[in-house]
Amino acid sequence: MAPKTTPEIGGMGHSVKRREDPRFLRGQGNYVDDVVLPDMLYLDIVRSPYAHAKINSIDTSKALAIPGVLAVITGKDLEKYNLHWMPTLMSDTQMVLPVDKVMYQAQEVAAVLATDRYIAADGVDAVEIDYDPLPVVVDPKKALEPDAPVLRTDKPDKKDNHIWHWEWGNRDETDKLFSEAEVTVKEDIYIPRIHVSSIETCGCVAHFDKVRGKLTVWMTTQAPHAIRTVFALVAGHVGLSEEKIQIISPDIGGGFGGKVPVYPGYVIAVAASVLTGKPVKWIEDRMENLQADSFARDYHITAELAGNKDGKLTALRIKTIADHGYTDAAANPSKFPAGLFHVCTGSYDLKAAHVEVDGVYTNKPPGGIAYRCSFRVTEAVHTIERMADVMAHELGMDAAEFRMKNFIKPEQFPYKSALDWEYDSGNYAAALQLAMDRIGYADLRKEQTEKRARGELMGIGISSFTEIVGAGPSKHFDILGLKMFDSAEIRVHPTGKVLARFGTKSQGQGHETTYAQVVAEELGFPVDSVLVEEGDTDTAPYGLGTYASRSTPVAAAACAIACRKIKDKARKIAAYLLEAHEDDLEWEPGKFFVKGSPDRAKTIQEISLAAYTNHPPGMEAGLEAVNYYDPPNLTYPFGSYICVVDIDKGTGEVKVRRFVAIDDCGNIINPMIVEGQIHGGLTMGLGPALYEEIQYDESGNILQGSFMNYLLPTAVETPNWETGNTVTPSPHHPLGAKGVGESATVGAPAAIVNAVVDAMWHLGVRHIDIPITSAKVWKLLRDAGVKD
Amino acid sequence: MDKVAINVNVNGVDHAAEVEPRMLLVHFLRETLRLTGTHIGCDTSHCGACTVVMDGRAIKSCTAFAVQADGRKIMTVEGLEQDGKLHPLQDGFFQEHGLQCGFCTPGMLMTGYAFLGENKSPSDDEIRHAISGNLCRCTGYVNIVKAYQYAAQKMRDNGGA
């Protein structure tokens, strides 16, 4: 689609260079650890060495004897203010600091307040805690056994470790289709615990001004407004009042979902500042971040797919055990405890489906947040894309041909899925065909056949995913009751410059550029004259924040609607200035002119000035608008990825030789930024597919607690991603856009696993759980009798 | 704890200071000198967000003590821009969209500064190995490699830096 605006205006479709870059390139970003206030104190946290233990005593005397240590805060201190527990985003409860027992290794047990970060760390070392270890429950399946120790003894009615049961779909129809099916396949698929590991950890600077009664918190949060409301609700009884709480989300060094929850450290820092009246800084180190902050995934899935011998799929049946750790602190819309997992029918036209999920408590850190995906969508996509591949191989069909046969067809949109989602638009076959053409699919299959004859292991894997983003329509979507709209407030200044503020918060996505491009597209102001601000709750309009790829689907839509309100007023002002009827005016980017007389025109800048200096009699002065956008539906980006792997028979090492990614996120605001989002998303798909996993031993000790053993992909392992796109606009979004930040993370792992299994299917391999380590492949090869 | 006197030249400016022997170089730069462009991303020298150049070599300032910088020349991201002109690496990251959240960027730039000083015409593969001690979660590295190549080309065209 050719851009409607000139490069000077820089509206949609232009690869405008990023307006946030100049400060970052000079080391002039303002991240939370860069914030320094006079008399600021430092908070450091004492953490539990045990996964489950009774606390007998906490001796703070040696810590308090260290010069510079001002206080040691324990659960008993917070209990006096009823602040020792807090609600989670899923309306469960989580300890801020424990009073009597710890529930996972690295849990916060006490906090040391000191004048210096080194002294605070000395204080942490000097706190002496006496524990009695308790039986540990690590495996969620064992947690459900009748004789398992009940973990949440704080809940008087709780007699087991089962949190909730959730199911969706038509069970009877699904069972009937399975009983009638000519072919069925079944796999156990474990999607392990992983961690987003943004390069900046979490932290805050809390400053309570006792005289004014105002709390200001600079905080690594993706959702500053929701945090403000949560603080007001949780700490209202100690005097915090929402109009006197200011949350500032400064530059954020990556979020990916890990900066949505409220962590105990934030709350303790706020409490410490309220008690002392001094600013308090708390910054996690990497090990704390990995060991205690919210995890993602940890889904134990059993999936079954039914179909006919001709390759036509009919039904899907899934049962899942979700390991939530000791509390359900997932970040899902409240109506959906398993998130949007029921988008698991994917890109395929199925007759029926049924999905069940059971949430379970274990002695592990809480979480269940996204890892660069919307609410369990990666789990859903991984399952269906793996199962589709298993079915294709079982039937002896080519994986691409099989997908083509089962795709929802373009003419079926809007399409009601077997699990009740209404997909807005799609052309799945076009994306897959483009990916096949780009990578040279037929030639690769020929090469594979030749190599297999020589005993070499090469695999080709496809993933044709459908994403679901842009939460969401308020009739279904809320978090703690807050509806999931988002907002834009646009002010045009007299000299034709624009201030645009949003309820979202960029963590690297480039909002300062893309939102300005939306204003440029709608109103014709050059992108350079638009200043975008977000992240300060005292100035930005209320919104639910940036996660789940919702900024473009929701906040950019709000921006477009607010701009259209401004344009309506601008038209009236232009008509007055031109002494013409507004129906006789035409718009081209940047000006109104009288039909048939292009010389009789008023630029948007002239109109801006007139709005303050010469506006029509009876009209309010000024040129500004606000919109709170409640999307009518979610958006459904999609794509097809093809991955080629070569496997070293001697070492089991998997080498990604090529990876072609074709994405369709509807109309594109900034092609450069969209491509960058896909590059990053693919790499966050590669990591979990091959390297990343957090495991625990039987005593609940974390085995990957630092970057020494939690492996993130470096530039050496990461392939040179090959990207491309098709464009299928969303019919209901004001800009036809869909959102893209997470598509690649959602779609990539299945393509990689499918490629590895494809290379080894003839050896009897049907499925490999991620991460596909060299050790796993080596063992499978040896079990199959393959020699070096 | 007894303090130790050190003299460190940072970005061409001499700084005399008294520091605790245990103070990390990254904290000296960020908190004593308030040069906050150098970041901290891990505790184990894996992520490279804290990379600075010491006497021409890229080092990780989170695992060096400030006292080890005594008598040495340090260059941080704040020292790249000269006379209001971005260094070719900074320009390359801007032109090629080599950054997103910006947190790993200063480390990536400083690794590149030392690397391109030694290798004027690197292959993509050499660049990928050169930055394998710098982790990025946002970009997928493709555009960082392009940014390095952009800078290398520009530096060759300029006959040096």
Image (cartoon, grey):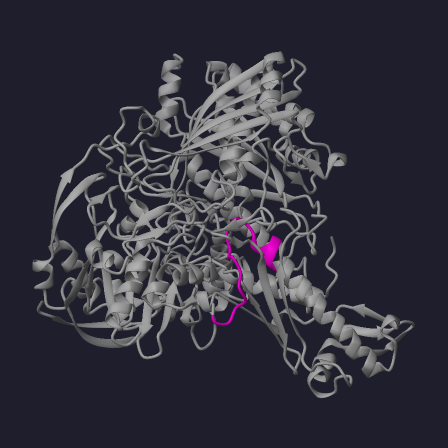
Please name whichever residue, A37 or A335, is drawn nearer the observer in this view of the structure.
A335
Res. B57 image quadrant:
bottom left
- Give x and y (percent) for residue A179: 59, 13
- Along the line of sight, which residue is nearer the eye, A60 or A592? A60
Work out whether residue A391 can be spotted.
yes
Q: Is residue A477 left or right of residue A573?
A: left
Q: Nearer the viewer, residue A522 or A589?
A: A522
Percent x, y for residue A694? 33, 37
Vertical position of residue A218 compared to residue A397: above or below: below
Q: Is residue A479 magenta?
A: no
Q: Can you say whether B122 is above or below A447 in the image? A: below
Instruction: Between residue A527 and residue A123, name the one nearer to us.
Output: A123
Q: Which quarter of the image is occupied by the C terminus of chain A?
A: top left
What is the x, y in percent for residue A353? 59, 26
* Residue at 14% in and 59% down: A122
Q: Is residue A622 above or below residue A336?
A: below
Give percent across and percent down for residue B42: 30, 52
Seen from this angle, which residue lies furthest bottom?
A613
Q: Is residue A553 magenta?
A: yes
Left or right? Give the position of A370 relative to A416: left
Residue closest to the far front: A157
State left or right for residue A239 relative to residue A313: left
Q: Which residues are magenta?
A: A538-555
- How many numbered tags mark residues here? 0
Q: Can residue B54 be spotted in the picture?
A: no
